[in-house]
Image (spheres, rainbow, N blue to C red):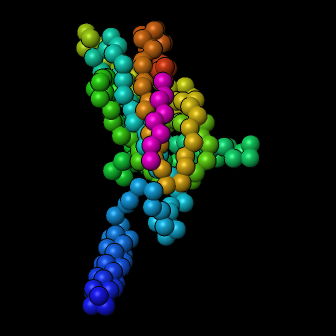
Amino acid sequence: MTYNIRRLGIFAGAGVVIATLIIAGIVTGGIAIPGLRLPSMASDKGTLIVKLTDAPVELEHLNVTIANVSACRVSNDEETWVKLPFVGGVSSVYIDILSLQNITKDLSVADVPPGNYTKLRLDVSTANATYVNGETVDLTVPPGHIDIIVHFEIKAGESTTVLLDMQADWVAISSSHKLRPVMKATVISGK
């Protein structure tokens, strides 16, 4: 009987050692276990992902060069603009907005301070439209940027995706050569 108790004690001790080694391996290996957040693993920033898509319009091409993307963070009634880097580290993004029908393009994936955000801004340096007859016209973007009013919260250690849908204003393009899109934003929160 004492032999069985001693044997049981040896197996229990070995089990504790093995469990400790497994937990240490998980922690040092960086494997995430839902619900397990050690203080050293906690991030003080959340991730913001901005995507762009398009609804159909009567144009062949709607080319836009986005020179800057930024998000407006509001804290204690003060607005702070947070510049967001483009995916791939490029300095600007040139894109035919019409090529985004039924697909999305990642503009920015950035770690930003947690808090409440109320607006996104796309600074547009150039824009042009090509009609179905082949004629191309340069467009202006008064006042040089497009503001998208959208409220979202960034939480530390979590990701939030904002999907922007740019719908071209056909009347503004054809009559005044101005790019005044209707912007629709959808916020998708995640972990």
**Is 105 displayed left or right of 79 in the figure?**
left
Q: Nearer the viewer, residue 182 or 124?
A: 182
Where does the image place residue 59, in percent across and percent down from the top left?
Answer: 31, 14
The overriding secondary structure of the stretch rendered in magenta is: strand
Q: Is residue 190 magenta?
A: yes
| In-image side of 11 versus 119 (left or right) | left
Where 178 falls versus 133 (above or below)?
below
Residue 34 left/right relative to 121: left
Of all residues shown, which one is farthest toward the front? Answer: 1
Whether residue 35 is situated above or below residue 189 in the rendered picture? below
Instruction: Tell me what residue is drawn at x 33 percent, y 32 percent.
Output: 104
Residue positioned 56% across, 38% down in the render: 152
Vertical side of 174 occupied by 79: above or below: below
Pinpoint residue 74: horizontal percent, then vertical percent: 66, 43
In the image, the segment drawn in magenta is 184-191
User: Can residue 136 be seen at all in this image of the molecule?
Assistant: no
Q: Which of the 4 image quarters holds residue 63?
A: top left
Q: Is residue 107 magenta?
A: no
The x, y position of residue 12, in whole percent, is 33, 80
Q: Quadrant of the N terminus?
A: bottom left
Residue 62 vertical placement versus 5 (above, below): above
The residue nearer to you, when weighing 44 against 39, is 39
Residue at the spot 62% in from the left edge and 43% down from the top edge: 116
Q: Residue at x 48, y 33 (%)?
A: 187
- Residue 68 vs residue 116: left or right? left
Q: Quadrant of residue 29?
A: bottom left
Question: 58 or 139: which is nearer to us?
Answer: 58
Q: Position of residue 164 (x, y in %)?
A: 44, 30
Near-viewer residue (44 or 18):
18
